[in-house]
Image (spheres, grey):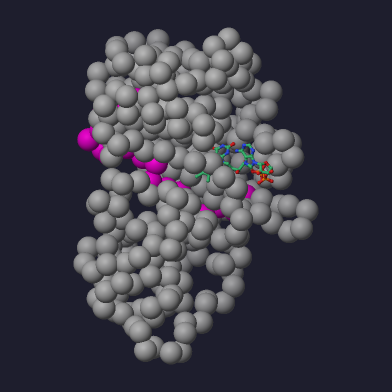
Amino acid sequence: MTDPILTLRVAEVTPETDDAVSVSFDAGEGTELRHRPGQFLTLRIPAPDGWVARCYSLSSAPGDTRPTITVKRVPGGMASNWICDRLRPGDTVETLPPAGRFTPASDHRNLVLFAAGSGITPVMSILRARVQEGGRALLVYANRDDRSVIFAAELRRLTEAYPDRFQVLHWLETLQGLPDAARLAALVRPWAAPDAALLCGPAPFMRAAAEALEHLGVDRTRVLTEEYRSLASDPFAMLTASPAQLPADAAETATVTVELDGRRRTFPWPARTTLLDLLRAQDVDAPFSCREGACSACACRVVDGEVKMLRNTVLEEEDLAEGYVLACQAVPLTDRVEVVYD
Ligand SMILES: Cc1cc2nc3c(=O)[nH]c(=O)nc-3n(C[C@H](O)[C@H](O)[C@H](O)COP(=O)(O)OP(=O)(O)OC[C@H]3O[C@@H](n4cnc5c(N)ncnc54)[C@H](O)[C@@H]3O)c2cc1C
Ligand code: FES
């Protein structure tokens, strides 16, 4: 099994606001990060009792000279404060490969984006990529006040560079109060029907934005959301631990065929074992991050048979309709299952 852990060298730490920094990494040999706009890294961060793992979205677009994350302090938070206070150019950090499904389909070129606070990070990556490729985007961006607006100058530059294709509408809570569905819908209404809408921010903001899109008749399957949370588990510990032992009792065992990195392999699949545990035990380099059904790093597509997910707080209706499942939560329902990692 190849080691999925990458070591990145910090090139620059740039203050964005009083409580947010961008950290860019040298994309040197062996640390090349291929990612889609909107994906995240899972970093290993020192903590008082050892280590914690935390996800941070890339704010840079694929192909930018330096992959960059943008981190906002959470009061009392372990990793965000360590990154803002301690990380310096020349330091190294370990990460899992870029992952996540908060990324528009390649033919979705007309986007409505809703971001609040540090939720701008993956949205920035998406809009940088789409606008540079000739697509259109409207961004509704909510913040407490004008001092807390991350990327204010870069957003101004983009609106000047692409006046016909990119517009940003700032929402400042100190002036306008908390955003609600009716007022968000009124802001977005003049923008032509989007191919997709992407939402990232605190839960109440995302609920209001989703309701606004519903009022405007945007199909639910065209709405993608990214929820921020801290990981409770440590995926790095799992990678260094010996593989899980599969149950010896094979009374209820299905068969799974897995296509990953151009290789097809077939394994017996014990009924109560998750697909991810099975694949790691078989030395298959299947991707993952949270193992809690919350990040989608482990998503794969079922092309034959059926599985049950024990937990899913991240895949949307559109993903499920396309056959996507979370390997870290999938157990077999039929005797034969076939899955593909895209
Ligand atoms: C897919 C994904 C992408 C993410 N991308 C980014 C990103 O681009 N930039 C970024 O800054 N963060 C991002 N996050 C959030 C990040 O992973 C951490 O959850 C966050 O930095 C807090 O971690 P911490 O260790 O500092 O705080 P912790 O020590 O985990 O938490 C400290 C306290 O703060 C609370 N808390 C945790 N998170 C938040 C929050 N976001 N807001 C308010 N209170 C909170 C906790 O409940 C706890 O009480 C992302 C999360 C996910 C799952
Ligand atoms: S590893 Fe995060 S959802 Fe499976």
Ligand 1 - quadrant of the structure image: top right
- The image quarter containing residue 89 is top right
Residue visible at 50% across and 20% down in the picture: 179
Drawn side of residue 228 relative to residue 76, left or right? left
**Residue 49 at x, y = what percent?**
76, 58
Compared to residue 228, the image places residue 124 above or below, namely above
**Residue 149 at x, y = what percent?**
57, 19
Say which quadrant the N terminus sits in: bottom left
Compared to residue 166, the image places residue 234 above or below, namely below
Residue closest to the eye, 108 or 232: 232
The number of callouts visible is 0
Residue visible at 61% across and 56% down in the picture: 232
Residue visible at 71% across and 39% down in the picture: 81
- The image quarter containing residue 143 is top right
**Residue 54 at x, y = what percent?**
59, 49
Magenta residues, start to end: 93-112
**Residue 100 at x, y = what percent?**
42, 48
Residue closest to the eye, 224 or 109: 224
Compared to residue 106, the image places residue 180 above or below, namely above
Residue closest to the eye, 271 or 90: 271
Residue visible at 43% across and 55% down in the picture: 312
Q: Is residue 158 visible?
A: no
Drawn side of residue 50 relative to residue 299, left or right? right
Say which quadrant the C terminus sits in: bottom left
